[in-house]
Amino acid sequence: MINKNDKVIPEKTLLVIPNKGITNEEVGSLLTSLSSMRKRDWFTDHFYYCLPLAVGNRYGFIVKAQRDFTAYWDGTESPAGVTITSASTDRYLQNYDGHFGSGIITVQNFWHFRTPPGVNLMTINPPNFPQHGLMHMTGVIETDNLRRDFTFNLKITKPGVYINIKAGDPVGAFIPVPRYFADGFSVKYANELYSDDEIELEHITGDEFARQRRTEDLKKTHQAGKRYLKGEDAWGEKFPDHQK
């Protein structure tokens, strides 16, 4: 049995189990890692000077729509209030329906995911892929334990509007997260842990960043000092671990 005894899924592995009759290649055509997708079609060059956005573009995985479909919500809570029409195909790899009601489009894929012990999958909005009228619902799934599929759910944010999804558009996104990782964090205030002098140095450094943005950075390309992009603080000191 997968994830039991000597059949444990290797670390940092996302295991995909297609339904019977579905091929790896078919699933692969709809599943994409974002790790190398730094760019977005709607970004201008200026966006890429913001390293957090560029790195965020590369986080997680997306599931793409197999075919065109249109959804309409009449504003009621009933499942009958969501109408979905989709293009036909000889090979169905996904279902689209509104069985939850409340303006929710449910996407069911004909495969499921498993992860190594202690690793959940968290469904998220597709990173920097805006979709008019839709919000992707967040869920956290124990895919190391769950031996079946889970659905991706998209909330229509405004009734009375037709939502048009094209084949290849993201209909789901997710990232692996260690179970309980976020649960272990708590809020502490700086004066509970650090001296006044240490806190003041943070303020001074922040003020220096602000001063640079108001003065010399305005004369640079895109009015950007690129300190964060280069992995250094306001004084030019390099970050010890910098993601690009």
Image (cartoon, grey):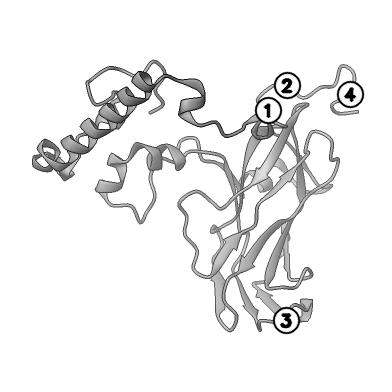
Query: In the drawing, does residue 164 fall left or right of residue 149?
Result: left
Label 2, secondary structure: give it. loop
Asked if labels 2 and 1 touch by Cβ distance under 8 angstroms, the answer is yes
Nearer the observer: mark 1 or 3; the answer is 3
Q: Earlier in the sequence, mark 3 or mark 2?
A: 2
Q: Position of residue 193 (x, y in %)?
A: 50, 21
- Residue corresponding to mark 3: 81
**Distance CA(mark 1)–CA(mark 2):** 6 Å
Q: Quadrant of residue 212?
A: top left
**Distance CA(mark 2)–CA(mark 4):** 12 Å
Asked if labels 2 and 3 touch by Cβ distance under 8 angstroms, the answer is no
Label 4, secondary structure: give it. loop
Asked if labels 1 and 4 touch by Cβ distance under 8 angstroms, the answer is no
Q: Quadrant of residue 224?
A: top left
- Residue corresponding to mark 2: 10
Any part of residue 76 in sight: yes
Q: Earlier in the sequence, mark 2 or mark 4?
A: 4
Q: Which mark is residue 4?
A: 4
Q: Which mark is residue 13?
A: 1
Q: Local crowd at mark 3 within 10 Å, few (<14), some, or many (≥20)?
A: some
Q: Which mark is residue 202?
A: none
Q: Position of residue 223 (x, y in %)?
A: 16, 43
- Up-down: is 180 above or below 154? above
